[in-house]
Image (tube, coloured by chain):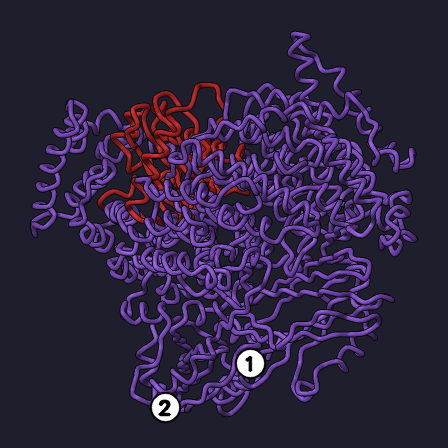
Amino acid sequence: MMRFLLLFSRQGKLRLQKWFTPIPEREKKKIIREMTSLVLARQPRSCNFLHWKDLKIIYKRYASLYFCLAIENQENELLALEVIHRYVELLDKYFGNVCELDIIFNFEKAYFILDEFLMGGEIQETSKQIVNRCIESSDMLQEDDSSEWYEVELFG
Amino acid sequence: MSDVVEKTLTALPSLLSLDSQPGSAKLSSTSKLGNLIRGITELTSKHEEEKLIQRELSSIKEQVSSPNTTMRQMKELMVRTIYCEMLGYEASFSYIHAIKLAQQGTVLEKRVGYLAVSLFLNESHELLLLLVNTVLKDLQSTNLIEVCMALTVVSQMFPKDMIPAILPLVEEKLNHPKEIIRRKAVLALYKFYLIAPNQVQHIHNKFRKALCDKDPGVMTASLHIYLQLIQENPEGYKDLTASFVTILKQVVGGKLPMDFNYHSVPAPWLQIQLLRILSLLGKNDQSTSEIMHEVLDESLRRAEMNHNITYAILYECVKCIYTIHPKSDLLEKAAKCIGNFVLSPKINLKYLGLKALTYVVQQDPKLALQHQMTIIECLDHPDLIIKRETLELLFRITNAQNVTVIVEKMLEFLRISGDDHTTIDLVGKVAELAEKYAPDNEWFIETMNTVFSVGGDMMQPDIPNSFLKLLSEGFDSVEEDRKLRLFAVNSYISLLQGTPGKLPQRFLQVISWVLGEYSHLREDLEAAVVLRLLARLLDMKNCSSETKSWVLTAMTKLCEGGSGVSVAQQVSETYSSSLDTVLRQRAQELQYLSQDSELRARVLPRGAGLEPVEVDSSLSFLDGFVSEALAAGAAPYKPPHQRQEELAGTKALSLEPYGLSLPISMSSCSITDRQSPTLLSMSSGLSGDSTDLSHKGGSATLKLDGVKRVWGREGYLSQKEPVEEPAQVEVPSPLRSPSQQGEADSSHSQTPTPTPTPESDQEKQQLASSLFVGLGSQSSVCLMGKSEPTAQRFRRKAKGHSTASSPSEQISNSVVSPHSAVDNLLCNNLLDSNITSELALSSPELTSQPSPGLTTTNGTCDTEAELPDSDIKESEPAVIRDNSVVATDPAPHEAPDRPKDLCLTSHLPAELSGLSHSEISHLCTNQSLELSACHVQKEDSLLLVVFITNSSDSAAQQILVQVDSEELEVSCVCDSPVEEVSSHSVTVCQYSLTVKRPAVHIEVVGMVSYQLANGTSQSAQFSYKLPLTSFIRPLTVSTEEYGTMWLAFSHDTKQNLTLISDSQEPLTATLNVLKRKLQLHVVEIIGMEGIVACRVLQDQPCLMHCRVHAGTLAVWLRSPIPDLPDCLIYHCQRALQGH
């Protein structure tokens, strides 16, 4: 199971946080601080896996953004790396050539995509098409709620 | 279908607001959020940012509370608030508005509302209760998107106690026509299963339906639940193996829709999940493993592409192949695969290769030999993670020959690593290796010194505890004990003469205890000198009061002679006015005892460490006093945690900080020495992370030239100069061959490795030979035998108690036959000549095949019993280590002897024979001794009866059975413990069990150690499981009493149970079943409601309120004990299911 996912910039600014298990607020802040300092201190070309307490931290840098995923000890590291990669692909498909600014200004969209992709710390849907379809159809619902046919399209 | 959506998308943009259009990032930056973000980036200081955000937040606050704000504006405000919170500023005023938005907004607004709630609130936040209704409403909505959102938020965070409220709705969704809803429902149930397994117990058959769902996505989701279920109970799901194999076959064969592909690999997540499940099912089960061999082979074959995801699958495949029952050609392929990982230039793959090796070497050490040069390169890798993983691998292949080199590498790493968690872990491992394989006293003490000074105050309390235990209990050779202790004393004196200020507190405590006990061993040392050194510690600024009290206790033991007394007097004067009561107490003791040497000799006799002190843990001598006080109107005693609980009222209080102060089960571990309170080992295992990280002791490193001198040389030396050494002469030549072969093996595999510079190469070769020595000889035995990792461990002869490990091989060797002059000579020789590794080198042979030569030398050796069936021995390597101490795990394959069991029943003590007892089950067999056990239900107690059957011709003496459990309080019933079982007879031990911490199933673990007539000692471990139901007794209370108790209890759980509806009065019938099966007491039944009470031994009440509601039995359990309601509800379910 995944425990948490953090996105932060090279300057250590948090861009997105997702916690899959309940953690007290103060502890979260501490973890974020530790993660940024731990990951940012890594040399380029080092291993993408880290030990932290009883968890494993899988991180990867995409342009100026670090993706940092904590998984339980028995989980597969390479697979976690691909979870990150798939999330980036999903963001890319949604935003079209995604960059850090997209995520800063539309972080709520990034959360929605994540919620379609992962649920309760496990993979829910890996298909780019389906995730995107879900997000877009909800996006389009707009103010008038009556557009039932979108649902038909979406779930048909 | 997606075409339609896409077309719609292209047609619609002009109609849509900019905000919601995909890919509109740049445009939306003109929004208010955009302004805020840009405002922040323009700032230069943290202070300015804080000012800006505070301003922003107060403006948001004003707007959200204004009644004119529309939901649409609210949504925008909420997004900004989320942003502020992400920057670390609290905006708790907005939480309630987030819930409101989720409640009242349209779908799009609701989505933001739910997002904000899931980001702001925690599972335990009280505002969440307000969300329950919203979730209920949305779950019933006809709008599928709302249902999806509700399911998402439920799986993200939902209050545990409110799960029953929505459970039926979520369950219903399992039958929903849309697969996306079914899938989300399954994942939500999975989440429920994780946080409250009891709540979803009744829907296990629905999980099966989800597993058979026609949509692969739903099936995949259900596997998460199955993985958990199978992890807990692999036996219960063996019948599904074939189905899982079929699914995997289909997936691997590319039968799933393209949607499931990831970079053209079919459903990798699903594949890995299945592989994981299969490895759980196939573990230790040959027939189940055989079903999966074919598909594993295919998985290995198909995963060819050079992509991370295929490597991920391969890695899981290899793990599975090595976990299940072995098949040689699969193992071969898997080993090749591991080779690809290890040799890969990609660092991530190399890391995983090392991990796989670590996993595999226990069964196949040869593999480590194959890759030794790579391993050595990794040991010097610049990336600490790789280095750390390599050490992990080396830890697994450590033996008596390479221990010095490996431990040195570990210590080296410890000195550069700054990570607390790593330090704690590694320090524990070093200590473990040092105790297991130490080649000599000096090395052991010096290594432990480093462990203590590096590990500091972070390390597990176990380490100093077991170290002291080791020193105090000693071995059978008095001379050896003396040497070890003396060496410790010398080492510590010189440390104290240096700069003790840098040493961590724990180390100082160890030092003071050892000096207090054993400094008299050094005759040239005056007590006054030691006293002065100790007194210096007291003056140090960073010396904690706990350490001070250790120091004072040590001084109390030492204060004699004129100058000594004067130092003691001086110190006791200083501290007799200390604010710390413990210190004052110690100072007083010191003062009195230093004046009265006669009294001191009586109170603190020298060398009393070995005398067990009987502790009356029930404090029965105070009974008279207590009853008098009670008669005089005193309030009855309540244990601290109960008082705490009552103080806290109904609000559940985290008891963790008080965890340690709870009374330790005194009776289960008799204290050996009252002067060293921490000797009670509170936890075992080295992995724990319970240690308080805030204690950052001075992590000064010691200069330990001793260790430096040893490392790297010894292992190598041993090969360079093979020996004129008595032990070698004893060993007949054929027996040496396996080890020689192993060496040949290793040197052979070294040669092909390409190397840049010949010199560094030579160094590496040397290192390799010292690291991998001794592996080859074991591999032949271990490969198929799947030897347990513990098989290596050998136990030191116990005196009174058995402890987990032995500090040094030679010591145990000399312990073996103290009576035999030949042996003594041999051992002394060994010690004096200091060619320690030679002895070590010869030991594996002794291990796998006891040498007849040695047997004859010993004369009294008892290995004869083993000799006839040497076959067995080969499949169980390292059962016999040298001819001394044996540690076997209970042999699982030996089925209990039925007729014998019948006989055992007759050995039940007369007073128990009339009571109902469980089936007698076999615990373990060790050599001539066999242990069985059953439990007997008495009205007020539960007895565990252990039968010790001695089937050999000689008596077993000094029997010591230790029984302990995490959940139970165990006390021995008999007054005088069993000490001897004569030949061909059965002896019975009884233990009274009471529940300390309720659990659904309770496990008792224990160890038996004994001595055979010839003086060799043996030990074996066992475990015994019993259900909580055995501890349940009816609690007879009146309805009134029930009422007052009900209100006083704070822990509760609610659940619907099946009602037995086949009779006239379903409630009565159901309660009667519970009464009969679980021994509950039915207090009263009024109409459709019933109240039931029970207690769990000793006196842990649990009340149950039942109400018939809509064809089910709604029960509500309450108890003052956490977890008890949950455990009980489980058994109630079971009881009713079986009906």
Tell me which chain appears purple: B
Q: Residues within 10 Å of mark 2 (few under 14, many from 20)?
A: few
The residue sitting at 73% across, 67% down in the picture is: B931
Mark 2 in CB contact with mark 1 (< 8 angstroms): no
- On the image, the x and y values in percent for residue B1075 come to 52, 85
Q: Which colour denotes chain A?
A: red
User: Could you tell me which quadrant the C terminus of chain B lies in?
Assistant: bottom right
In the rendered structure, find residue B1039 and report the number of the disc placed on it.
2
Foreground mark, 2 or 1? 1
User: Could you tell me which quadrant the N terminus of chain B lies in?
Assistant: top left
- On the image, the x and y values in percent for residue B124 come to 31, 57
Label 1 chain ID: B
Element type where label 1 sits in the image: loop
The residue sitting at 21% across, 34% down in the picture is: B17
Residue on which disc 1 sits:
B941
- Is residue B1020 visible in the rendered image? The answer is yes
Left or right, B894 with reference to B1095: right
Left or right, B1111 with reference to B861: left
Amino acid type at image mark 2: Thr
Label 2 chain ID: B
